[in-house]
Amino acid sequence: MLRIVASLFRGMRITLRTFFSKNQTVQYPHEKEAHAPRTRGVIALKEENCTVCMLCARECPAWCIYIEGYKDQGPPRREGGKPRLAQKLDRFDIDYSLCMYCGICVEVCPFDALFWSPEFEYSTAHISDLLHDKNKLGEWMATVPEKPALEIGAEVKKPRGSVGD
């Protein structure tokens, strides 16, 4: 009987302590918490870097990335040279109703065309509105934070074609 009363008072003591402590709840739409600097929110696209290599779409486990491109003739590299063929991006869509936010597409992109944006407020009334095209993905590039500085003593990569390659 004494154990029951002691455990009851111990539970009441904890209840009273939390009752008078400061509230931890944030009233979300009116108050917003500060997020970590490199928070993962939504994937942003830098369209001019995309070469339509399809690596991101092939590596995506959810198959939520849709890419279409076409070949276009660009100017020759040298005077009198043969015009070169270049891939142009026609369609780049991500279906966020399927996306797992795993980040494999961002990691696998060899041309730095995909980035994590801290933007996370993009809910919609209809699930079909979660298919975002390249224009919407490009708008989020403005919210992508700068890359962090290198650590002290780290070697800076030399650009290709520089002296010493």
Image (cartoon, helix red, strand yellow):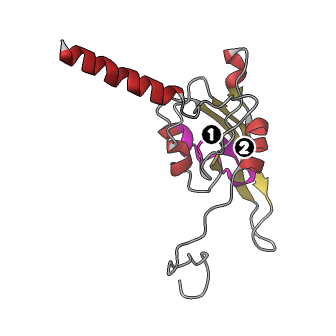
Which residue is at 72% across, 43% downward? 89
Q: Quarter-wise, where is residue 14 in the image? A: top left
Mark 1 lies on a secondary structure that is: loop
Residue closest to the far bottom: 164
Reply yes or no: does residue 144 show up in magenta.
Answer: no
Q: Position of residue 106 (x, y in %)?
A: 56, 47
Residue type beneath disc 2: Leu
Q: Residue at (52%, 73%) from the top-left corner?
A: 151
Q: Residue at x 56, y 75 (%)?
A: 157
Quick one: quadrant of the N terminus? top left
Q: Is 44 inside the magenta-drawn segment?
A: yes
In the picture, measured across the screen, residue 92 lies left or right of residue 142, that is left
Q: Gap between marks 1 and 2, in whole Å?
A: 24 Å
Of 80 and 86, nearer the camera is 86
Which is nearer the N-term, disc 1 or disc 2?
1
Q: Residue furthest top?
A: 1
**Highlighted magenta segment, given as a residue range:** 39-57
Give the amino acid at mark 1: Gly
Residue 165 image label: none
62 and 83: which is toward the camera: 62
Residue 89: assigned label: 2
Q: Which residue is mark 1?
A: 41
Q: Vertical placement of 13 versus 84: above or below?
A: above
Residue 101 is drawn in which quadrant? top right
126 horizontally vs 20: left or right: right
Mark 2 element type: strand
Q: Nearer the viewer, residue 164 or 145?
A: 145
What is the residue that sits farthest to the front in this orientation? 2
